């Protein structure tokens, strides 16, 4: 990703409509032996190096300003619009942004937007090694705002894989619980759920299953969580769904039917909110 590239264009070849573009790493200074073939690359191309000359600002056709500061990025509409309904709408000529070709994103931090660009230009993402909640949340929130569902899925998939790996290592006593890559994962998933809609129920199920399997909750805790008015209904539904699957995976239909409810007389049902009779 940090490969530096340089632009070299053969002036004698500019008028040839069939001229080709060739990328060359700076650390490989050997010139191309192909005659009349210009070498093109991008200096300090942290993103989009795989796209060669496309990252060059000479080809950019839209400017994005982020973080409410002077940080601007000269980008390419075709790339931005490929996965983002937000950018696609903003770049339409009927909108002010489409006419001016200038888009402001004051709520997205520069470092977060740069991760967005890495994804849009290279389809690459790696979960932070330290599993910092704010870094993961900011990127997920920005992806949600821009409508980049593919990135949201990858963030959750990598989170699930990391938790699965670390939880197994803890069970095998090869890793301490305090050493897992994502500390206090329940808190992180709750934050991510708040940035999502019920339509994304499916993509949250695997990570919730990992949490529920590793952090089994007793009856008192479940009742406490369900009774909290400020609790997220979506998060609670995901938790219940995971426990329901565990129940079906461990009990046959006969035993499930014989399980007694522990809900006491006078308690309210968390579904219909009616008071349970004795």
Image: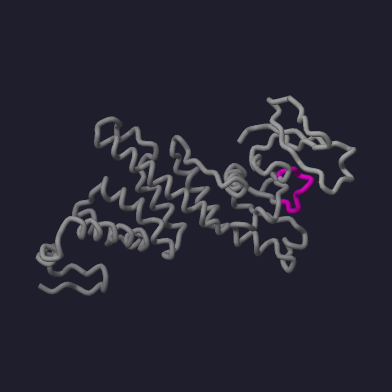
User: At 48% across and 48% down in the image, what residue appears?
Assistant: 137
Q: Residue furthest front?
A: 34
Q: Quadrant of residue 243?
A: bottom left
User: At 59% across and 52% down in the image, what residue appears?
Assistant: 107
Q: Position of residue 32 (x, y in %)?
A: 76, 30
Above or below: residue 276 compared with residue 197: below
Q: Position of residue 7 (x, y in %)?
A: 78, 35
User: At 74% across and 66% down in the image, what residue appears?
Assistant: 93
Q: Which of the image's four quarters has the N terminus?
A: top right
User: At 90% across and 38% down in the image, what residue appears?
Assistant: 12
Tell me, yes or no, if residue 264 can be seen here: no
Magenta span contains residue 62: yes
Q: Which of the image's four quarters has the C terminus?
A: bottom left
Q: Quadrant of residue 129?
A: top left
Image-based side of 143 in relation to 253, left or right = right
Image-based side of 38 in relation to 273, left or right = right
Front position in the image: 154 or 110: 154
Tell me, yes or no, if residue 34 can be seen here: yes
Q: Position of residue 112 (x, y in %)?
A: 57, 45
Magenta span contains residue 206: no
Front position in the image: 180 or 190: 180
The magenta region covers 55-63
Front position in the image: 3 or 266: 3
Above or below: residue 25 compared with residue 60: above
């Amino acid at each position: 990703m940090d490969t530096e590239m340089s632009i070299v264009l053969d002036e004698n070849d500019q008028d040839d409509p069939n001229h080709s573009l060739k990328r060359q790493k700076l650390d490989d200074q050997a010139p191309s032996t192909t005659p009349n073939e210009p070498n093109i690359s991008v200096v300090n191309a942290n993103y989009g190096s795989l796209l060669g000359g496309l990252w060059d600002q000479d080809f950019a056709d839209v400017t994005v300003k982020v973080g409410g500061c002077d940080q601007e990025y000269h980008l390419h509409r075709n790339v931005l619009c490929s996965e983002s309904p937000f950018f696609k709408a903003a770049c339409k000529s009927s909108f002010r942004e489409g006419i001016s070709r200038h888009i402001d994103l004051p709520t997205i931090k520069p470092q977060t937007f740069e991760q967005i660009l890495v994804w849009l230009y290279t389809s690459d993402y790696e979960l932070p090694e330290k599993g910092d909640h704010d870094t993961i949340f900011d990127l997920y929130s920005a992806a949600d705002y821009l409508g980049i569902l593919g990135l949201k899925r990858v963030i959750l998939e990598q989170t699930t894989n990391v938790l699965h790996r670390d939880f197994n290592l803890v069970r095998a006593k090869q890793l301490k619980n305090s050493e897992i890559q994502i500390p206090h994962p329940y808190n992180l998933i709750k934050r991510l759920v708040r940035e999502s809609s019920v339509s994304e129920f499916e993509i949250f199920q695997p990570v919730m299953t990992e949490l529920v399997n590793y952090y089994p909750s007793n009856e008192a805790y479940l009742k406490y969580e369900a009774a909290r008015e400020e609790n997220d209904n979506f998060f609670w539904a995901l938790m219940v769904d995971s426990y329901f699957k565990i129940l079906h995976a461990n009990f046959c239909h006969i035993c499930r039917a014989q399980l007694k409810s522990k809900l006491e007389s006078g308690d309210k049902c968390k579904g219909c909110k009616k008071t349970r009779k004795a």
